[in-house]
Amino acid sequence: MNVMIVTNSAYLKPTYIMLYSLFLQHHQEKMNIYLPYEDISESELVELTVFVESYAGKKLYPLYVGDKFKTKVHSRNGINVETYYRILGINLLPESVERILYLDVDMVIRGSLNALYETELGNAALAVCEDIYGIINGFHAANKRRLLIPEEYSYFNAGVMLYNVKFLRDTGAVEKILDNIYQNYERYEYNDQDVMNEMYYDNLVYVGWDEYNCPPVWCYLNKEKIEQGVLEFADYNEMRELAKNPERMLQKYQNVTRQIYENAKIIHYLGNTKPWSTTREQSRLYEMFDEAYEEIVCMRKKDFSENSSGLCI
């Protein structure tokens, strides 16, 4: 399995946690971890390499992207410049790599990703998950309007993407994406995620967000729609109104948050939902979803106390 991540010196702690959770779920698999980077020191790279390669069949391949790109863009909406490196990294991959699974590092992996990795892509550019966080929080439609995405298509979250590397290479995707970024930079509120949605909205394979890209969100299903065989989630504004009338809310919606959390193979702590955030507000929702992160942290500490690698980061 080929996996791509991006990170920097300030974000190494969650990077270790995500990789540890990934390796726990894939003991037997050979795994090549490709890391496009710029702001990571040589000593940090050495430590990360030792950590990755302490697991059987796991290899780390750092890919230096250079320092020029960083002078052309800047962080926006709390999204680091490093997210763009998942684009730059495509052209740095070995020719033998024809597909690669990109994963954000603010995640915990809770199940096997083999089925996701083997998703049939055909001539699609990417396999992705719908942006349920935007749908429930009420800005999914606005993102589509801003990028002129037709009504019948959706908008995806770029935290989990299976790249059809051969297709992207053959179509000169990196150059086209970068051209769009440079020419329309101020229009793209969510960096390369916006660009890729705009360019590929009609050439994607969608996989279930509830399985492979599940953020901390309250999930309430419309009971009437369930009976019709349709899964319709309440959005943030409707839940806020119905919260004033709990009885009416229970009549109309079924809370399936716990079930979705329990079945998710990837928990994605996007935005300001991160367990390590010092500005995140208190919430019963976060208490639930933090369980996955806290479990992995405890397991990592236990492993560290039982071995002498010296790498509890």
Image (spheres, rainbow, N blue to C red):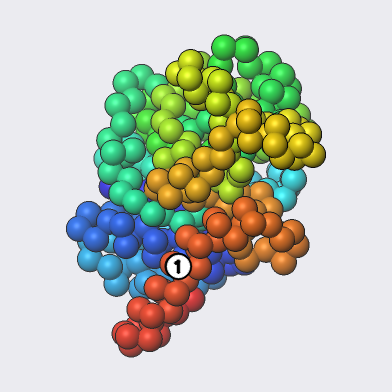
Q: Is residue 251 visible?
A: yes
In this view of the protein, which residue sits in the foreground, 265 or 90? 265
Where is 281 relative to 115, above or below? below
Residue 194: image quadrant is: top right
Report x, y in % for residue 72: 71, 43
Estimate the x, y position of residue 129 in percent, counting from the top left: 48, 33
As drawn, the residue found furthest toward the left would be 28
- Does residue 60 appear left or right of residue 261 in this picture? left
Q: Nearer the viewer, residue 117 or 306?
A: 306
Q: Residue at x 46, y 56 (%)?
A: 108
Q: Position of residue 293 (x, y in %)?
A: 50, 63
Considering only vertical position in the picture, is 180 above or below 19?
above
Label 1 element class: helix
For badge 1, the amino acid type reads: Glu
The residue lying at 44 percent from left, 27 percent from top is 206
Count neighbours of disc 1 (C-alpha within 10 A) and say few if under 14, some if 14 to 19, many if 20 or more: few
Q: Which residue is mark 1?
A: 295
- Give the image location of residue 258, x and y in percent: 50, 48
* Lateral position of residue 113 relative to residue 246, left or right: left
The residue under the point 54% across, 56% down is 289
Residue 298, located in which quarter of the rendered image?
bottom left
